[in-house]
Amino acid sequence: MPRMNMVQAINLALHQEMARDPSVVVMGEDVGMDEGVFRVTAGLLETFGAGRVIDTPLAESGIIGTAIGMAIAGVRPVTEMQFSGFSYLAIPQIEGNASRYRSRTQGQRTVPLVVRMPYGGGVRALEHHSESREATYAHLPGVKVVIPSGPRNARALMAAAIRDPDPVVFMEPKRSYRAFKEEVPEAEEVLPIGRAQVLQEGTDITVIAWGAMMRTAMEAVHRVEQARGASIELIDLLTISPLDVETIAASVKKTGRCVVVQEAPRNLGLASEIIAQINDRVLLWLEAPVARITGFDVVTPYFARELGYMPTPERVEAGILETLAF
Amino acid sequence: MPLETIQTFEVQRLGVLDAEGNLDTELEPDLSADQLRALMRAMLLAREADERMLKLQRQGRLGTFPPVLGQEAAHTAAAFAMAEQDWLVPAFRDMGALLLRGYPLVNYLQYYNGWEEGNQVPEGAKLLPTAVIVGSSLLHAVGLAWGLRYQGEPDTAVLTFVGDGGTSEGDFYEALNFAGVWQAPVVFVIQNNQWAISIPREAQTRAQTLAQKAVAAGIPGIQVDGNDALAVYRAASEAFQRARSGGGPTVIEAVTYRLGVHTTADDPRKYRTEDEEKLAWAQEPLLRFARYLERKGALDAGGLEAMRAEVRAEIQSAVDELEAMQPHPPELAFDHVFGTEHAVIAEQRASFLASVKAARGED
């Protein structure tokens, strides 16, 4: 199997899906000639031509709004928001229309649309280039939100997102874009949307993370395992909406302890919902309060200070140890 | 070095039949007596249905809705220029166009009774539902036009509407811009009815016309007398012809007047005078078109009254149909959120149903 980074893996999915289904088109700012500012759309223009790889005017609402019309016409647009920080200009279209056509028409008109967006901190970028606002999208009914954590699952989830009948916000942790490589099979691979993955089974505590925080969580988990010999179950959410509550509940029921790792601000983040779901489903199995290791409720600091803002393996390790000791 | 003029533009205004009945025979569209009667009937249906809906709303038998009174020509005559394969992407004050394009009146009544199922159109009807966020659906029209072309429909064009207030929205500019860049086959009709709820046209923009907003996007724009069905039809026909022949989009500013309320929750006495409304009534579109039909020998006064009776019977039967209907059950809200199974929503649906049954005293 070839080894590739996340950028190459998503690119592979785009190539394969466009080859498989002529209704798939790619559109966004600089996705053609420039191959995307992160090169995720490399080679697409050359392979599929300007009729299917569309360099759009610089207008996020315009990109999503027109993509909605295309999707209703039977096209499957894969749109790129250059950075998630710019995608808020398109929220009126995502919340106001993409998420609603299905219910507005009771299933008659639907919007199979992928909204790709690099998100998250850790790459020393400009203001508005480092936020982690996944909860904003996960709060919208009618929208699915997928967040891969590595090359292999990014590729398989992108294929699933493109084939999905609903609008999918596909958030790409840009800190993980080129941070590491994995073996990615060249043959088609599709992961189901809405399913978390148990990366390793354990009995003492459950650690839940997603996106770039998976690497942070893994490092902390390995430290605790080595230092304490603890048996830790590690869950990669992969989809944050719909949330895989069954996998979460089954794990916490078994371990009785849980730590959630979230890059986003603490207030009303996904961790809050995970804890509420745990309370609803398995409260009586808990041996300790569920801990949240999160960003802070501040405007994401500019890059000189961003690493202090983001959860570190040390903070996660401390959270796991405290929860184990409770 | 001296300043040089590198671009100039002009805005043309089209009128064919004025309120006094003067007709420009050179610009008069070539429509048969049957076609003229069909257009009259479509506008009359909108006028009469509107009036009936207002009564139903006041009696508590219908929800809030935006009447189309005074604007029947501005949208209906534009839709009359469509070909069978064309799509309509409405705003929310364009009932005449919707009904003309195969949207059943009973669906319109269902929708304004609060039932989403009213948005379902008969199989094959090339219509999108109303998108309430002002201006947002213009972009859908552009994408739809692009998509239909991509899907192998080179002769299909899309008609879409917006109001004068909507031309201040960012999505309006983005839609015109995308349509221009893509040369998308879209006909944008601005129903300039002078009022965006309480904000007059003059307070909406410093631009002297709304048609000139097309200039910045590099696409043709024209202003028409929006109360002149012949002018609206003519301008729209030319725009469709341009769209179909690869000439791209067109903006038509149809200057009209909202004779009624913004919605049934609105009271125009707070922001405009009755004198202004009286003056506007002298320009209303149906009377002048009826006189034109009479002069053409296409429809006399007796014929018009017979048409009105026929239209009223059609409305009555739609109202009867509505009132005999039960809305779909409340759990419908859970059924079309996603196209795939969703465990949490399924759980919430079950618990909702249990609470509904408990409230009814069922097991």
Image (cartoon, helix red, strand yellow):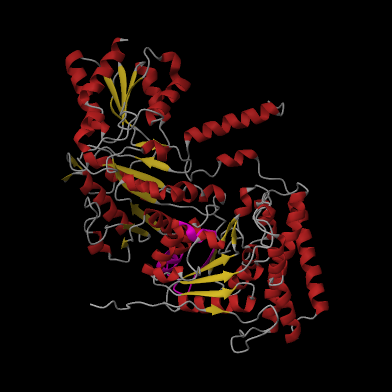
Q: In the rendered image of this protein, does residue A273 appear above or below residue A323?
A: below
**Image check: A243 left or right of B241?**
left
Q: Nearer the viewer, residue B298 or B219?
A: B219
Q: Residue at x 60, y 64 (%)?
A: B193
Q: Residue at x 41, y 14 (%)?
A: A285
Whether residue A129 is visible, yes or no, is: yes
Q: Is residue B63 magenta?
A: no
**Image check: B175 left or right of B350?**
left
Q: In the rendered image of this protein, does residue B249 appear above or below residue B34?
A: above
Quadrant (top left/top right/bottom left/bottom right) for the N terminus of chain B = bottom left
Quadrant (top left/top right/bottom left/bottom right) for the C terminus of chain B = top right
Which image quarter: residue A147?
A: top left
**Image check: B132 left or right of B146?**
right
Magenta region: which residues?
A: B145-169
Q: Position of residue B265 (x, y in %)?
A: 67, 49
Q: Residue at x 37, y 35 (%)?
A: A195
In this view, the residue farthest toward the top is A326
Q: Position of residue A139 (x, y in %)?
A: 44, 37
Q: Nearer the viewer, residue A13 or B280?
A: B280
In this view, the residue farthest toward the front is B2
Q: In the rendered image of this protein, does residue B105 appear above or below residue B20?
A: above
Q: In the rendered image of this protein, does residue A5 appear above or below residue A310?
A: below
Q: Nearer the viewer, residue B320 or A23?
A: B320
Q: Position of residue A49 (x, y in %)?
A: 27, 66
**Image check: B37 left or right of A67?**
right
